[in-house]
Amino acid sequence: MPENQNIEYKESWRDEYLKWICGFANANGGKLFIGIADNGKICGVIGVEKLLEDLPNKITSQLGIVCEVNLLQEDEKHYIEIIVPHYDVPISFHGKYHYRVGSTKQELQGAALNDFYFVKQEKHGMVYLSPLLH
């Protein structure tokens, strides 16, 4: 299956991928697979045990959200599936707001960030102050 609005593949883990998790949480949720190339071919992941322990902690401490982290195997190659739920409240990573659009991650700024806050307020009946107002 190719990358799309709800699926992203990465061959190995980098902490910067927390931005992608943030983007999924702010959009409709999604799945990030570690150990799969962009073309969908499983390449496997090294240090899988440490990642299984570290990833849930990093996600919670850096983003304040909880994701399901699963170990999967195919053809004797291990890879990791991170299931990111949609969150009703805006989620930020280091004070920046990311959003999943198609198969890309966008950093929301300016009018796009204000629109994002407005849509969250309208959908969920809550009031969020845009960081642009601070």
Image: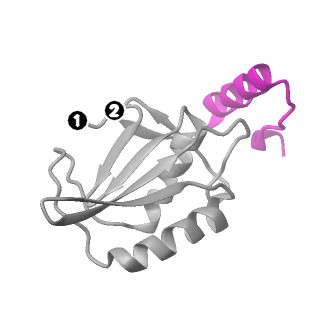
Q: Nearer the viewer, residue 38 or 43?
A: 43
Query: Quick one: SS at disc 1?
Result: loop
Question: Which colour assignment does the render follow?
Answer: one colour
Q: What residue is pinned by disc 2?
A: 4
Position of 133 compared to 86: left or right?
right
Expressed as whole percent of the image width and height from the top left, the position of residue 77 reads 18, 65
**What is the C-alpha distance between the residues marked 2 and 1?**
9 Å
Q: Residue at x 56, y 49 (%)?
A: 22
Q: Amino acid at mark 1?
A: Met
State yes or no: discs 2 and 1 in contact (Cβ < 8 Å). Answer: yes
Query: Quick one: SS at disc 2?
Result: loop
Q: Which mark is residue 1?
A: 1
Quadrant of the image occupied by residue 13 = bottom left
Q: Is residue 17 above or below residue 119?
A: below
Q: Residue at x 52, y 46 (%)?
A: 84
Q: Amino acid at mark 2?
A: Asn
Numbered-mark total: 2
Position of 53 compared to 42: left or right?
right
Specify the principal SS of the magenta part: helix
Q: Is residue 71 on the magenta stretch?
A: no
Q: Quadrant of the N terminus?
A: top left
Bin the neighbour count of mark 1 within 10 Å (Cα to Cα): few under 14, some 14-19, many 20 and up.
few
| Residue interval drawn in magenta | 109-134
Which residue sits furthest top?
122
Expressed as whole percent of the image width and height from the top left, the position of residue 50 reads 41, 80
Quadrant of the image occupied by residue 122 = top right
